[in-house]
Structures are given as structure tokens and as C-alpha cells.
Image (tube, rainbow, N blue to C red):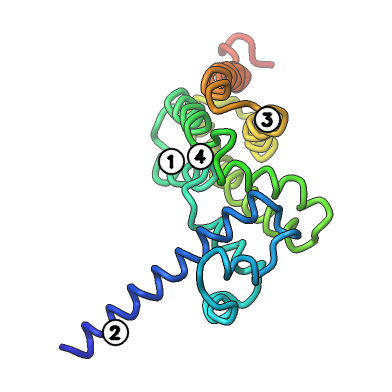
Amino acid sequence: MAERKAKTARQRQAEATKKNIADAALRLFAEHGVAGTSTRSIAKQAGVSEGLIFHHFPDKMALLAAVAATRTTFGTEVVKLLEGADARPLTEILDDMARMFSKLVVAGTPEAQLFNVLLGESRSNAELHALFRSVVARVTGAFAAYLKARVAAGEVREDLDLEVVARTTLGGLVFFFATHSHLSQAQWKRQAPKFAMEHMRLVREALRPPPPGDKP
């Protein structure tokens, strides 16, 4: 029993250490970019040895992947929202996504700054590009699968490429962020909700099936 408790304590300590390292990495990635951040600087920020970083993460890219996977981001929350949501009406899902975008992708936060870094650096870094593509594929895949269920329910028109619809819907939000990430948090909180809700309204109208008499 004592051995089991000791092991649990070690596990908790290891998890706390990994979180501390990930928190430090997030701050530095957001401030200096991925290419401009060394594992040595992460170790200094976290107050640990550089060797301890490599004990928990094989390399800097593995650390970045862990940061991206464990943070509460718009992408991770969209995937959670869509899990088991096939029966939920499209309007509810789109409205929830709009609210989540406005709440989570707040300009100026480390998570938002990191997303901005990934958008920029993934174009010139093959490893970052692969990571970014995998995140996008996971989110758009989940959304496309949900839309397929709503097509079957008669709520979404059936003549569309759902992968394109998913990428276009989410891409509109990403484009808004990329062109408005300079805003203060107060400005973002005024402008982002209005854009997100109007964007989703347009998506909803575009996906609505035509009246039966209008079908070719």
C-alpha cells in the first residue's frame, strides 16, 4: 500500500513538472516564436534543468505538440462539442461554436499568441506545418462528420462537399483572428462576437436545403 501511494505521489509530481514546463514553453513560444525559443530558455523559465525537459519530452517539437494538445483551445473545444452531437440541431452547434470562438480565441492571451505563431511559422517549418495540418484535419473532420449526420436528418443540403464546408466555416473564423489579432482584449470582446454570430448565420443560411418544389 505504501509503495502504491509513493508511486502515485511520484506520478503527481511528474505531471506537475510537465505542466510547469509546458506553461513556460507556452509563454516563450507566444513571445518569441517557436524558432526563437530554445529548450535552454524554457528550462530557465520553468526553473528546471534542460535535461529534465528531455526526460519528459523527446525534443522541442514534441513539447510544442504537448502544449497544443493539452490546452483548452477553440479547436479542442470544437471537437468536444461535436462528440455525440449528431442529433443536435445545426443552429445550436453553430451558435455554440461562435460563442466559444469569441470566448477562447481572445487576442493577447498566450494561447491566441501561440496560434498566431503557428499560423506564421508553419509556412516555413515542415514539422510545424505537419503539426498544424494534423490539428486542422482533426477539427474539420469532426465538423464534417457532424454535418453528414445533419444531411441525413434533412437539415443540411445534400449537394455540398462537407469537408469544404467545414474548412470554409472554420477558415472564416481563423481569417478574422489572423487579421484582428492586434486588437486589445476590450476591442476583441466587442468585435469578435458580432463577427462570429453573423458568420455562422451566413453559414446556416447557405446550408439550408431548398424547399421541395425548388429541387431540380
Crowding at dot 1, Cα within 10 Å, few <14 / some 14-19 / many 20+, comes out as some
Residue 80 visible:
yes
The residue indicated by pointer 1 is 81
The residue indicated by pointer 2 is 7
Which amino acid is tagged 4?
Answer: Tyr
Q: Which mark is residue 146?
A: 4
N-term mark: 2 or 3: 2
Which amino acid is tagged 2?
Answer: Lys
Label 4: state its secondary structure: helix
Q: Residue at x 48, y 57 (%)?
A: 70
Label 2: state its secondary structure: helix
Residue 113 figure quarter: top right
Asked if residue 52 lies left or right of residue 162, the reply is left
N-term mark: 4 or 1: 1
On the image, the x and y values in percent for residue 75 come to 54, 44
Alpha-carbon span between mark 1 and mark 3: 28 Å
Asked if residue 11 lies left or right of residue 196, the reply is left
N-term mark: 1 or 2: 2
Alpha-carbon span between mark 2 and mark 3: 46 Å
On the image, the x and y values in percent for residue 111 come to 56, 46
N-term mark: 4 or 3: 4
On the image, the x and y values in percent for residue 49 come to 55, 78
Which amino acid is tagged 3?
Answer: His
The residue indicated by pointer 3 is 182
Which amino acid is tagged 1?
Answer: Leu
N-term mark: 2 or 4: 2
Residue 137 vs residue 66, the one in the foreground: 66
